[in-house]
Amino acid sequence: MSADPAKLRLGVNIDHVATIRNARGGDLPDPVRAAHLAEAAGADGITAHLREDRRHIRDADIERLMAEIALPLNLEMAATDEMVEIALRHGPHAACIVPERRAERTTEGGLDAAGGQSRLAPLIGRLVERGIRVSLFVEPDFAQLDAAVAMGAPVVELHTGRWCDLLDAGDVEGAERERLRLAEAARHGAACGLEVHAGHGLTYANVTPIAAMAEIRELNIGHFLIGEAIFVGLEASVKGMRRLMDAAR
């Protein structure tokens, strides 16, 4: 990732390029090609979620991403022995531990780090020992952030999905309460020594208030950028997000 501590980094999630590929089978569109285009457009990192059911990203995609892209790879993964072994084998720059349920369309809600410390701590320890930067995808809740600190995870990614949903529903007061909750969590996390990231549901229309939070160091965005790319191309899609993020800072 960028060495500039003042820059808000952009991680581009390429999962849904693979979703389109898998809908028909074969090799196209190629998510690794998408990673190269994202890099050319100003992305600071690539995120890919290797799900247990392999519904989009495949094991071979992770192998190619590690071998072919210059940007750091953030491997999103469930807290399972299988996924930990895959992460240990490949050694990505970062591993973001997320909750995973087979029935969900996408990741819904944050990881219960506070309630799962006995299970999570040994997994986090193995990843950290391998030199992998561990992130926990959590709700903007102080107890979750404190649990991340206690388990030795250096990074948290705040789940912005609830805030985005409230905005979409026109609930102005609810959205403002959630924005304040996110801002307070970002400040608390930074004060605890965590590196704070954020993501889920972010678009051109709603990214600015989140990007403006000085304590947040990185945004991970995927679904919107891939969807927008259908109309304007991936490079233009990523560049548009990069401009909004830079303007917010």
Image (cartoon, grey):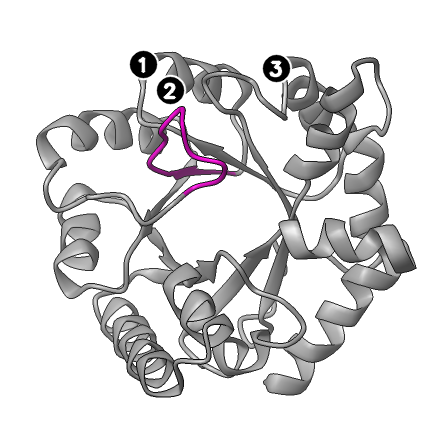
User: Dot 2 lies on which element?
Assistant: helix
Residues at circles 3 and 1 in contact by the CB criterion of under 8 Å: no
**Residue 3 can be seen, yes or no:** no
Going 80% across and 19% down the picture, which residue do you hit? Answer: 24
Type of the residue with mark 3? Asp
- Residue under label 2, please give it: 84
- Residue under label 1, please give it: 81
Going 60% across and 73% down the picture, which residue do you hit? Answer: 7
Magenta-drawn segment: 94-107
Q: Quadrant of residue 104?
A: top left
Type of the residue with mark 1? Asp
Instruction: Mark 1: give few (<14), some (14-19) or many (20+) Cα within 10 Å.
Output: few
**Residue 115 can be seen, yes or no:** yes
User: As rendered, which of 209 and 167 lies closer to the eye?
Assistant: 167
Q: Position of residue 34 (x, y in %)?
A: 81, 40
Q: Position of residue 35 (x, y in %)?
A: 77, 40
Going 27% across and 43% down the picture, which residue do you hit? Answer: 111
User: Sequence order check: which comes first, mark 2 or mark 3?
Assistant: 3
- Residue under label 3, please give it: 59
Question: In the image, 233: left or right of 129?
Answer: right
Type of the residue with mark 2? Val
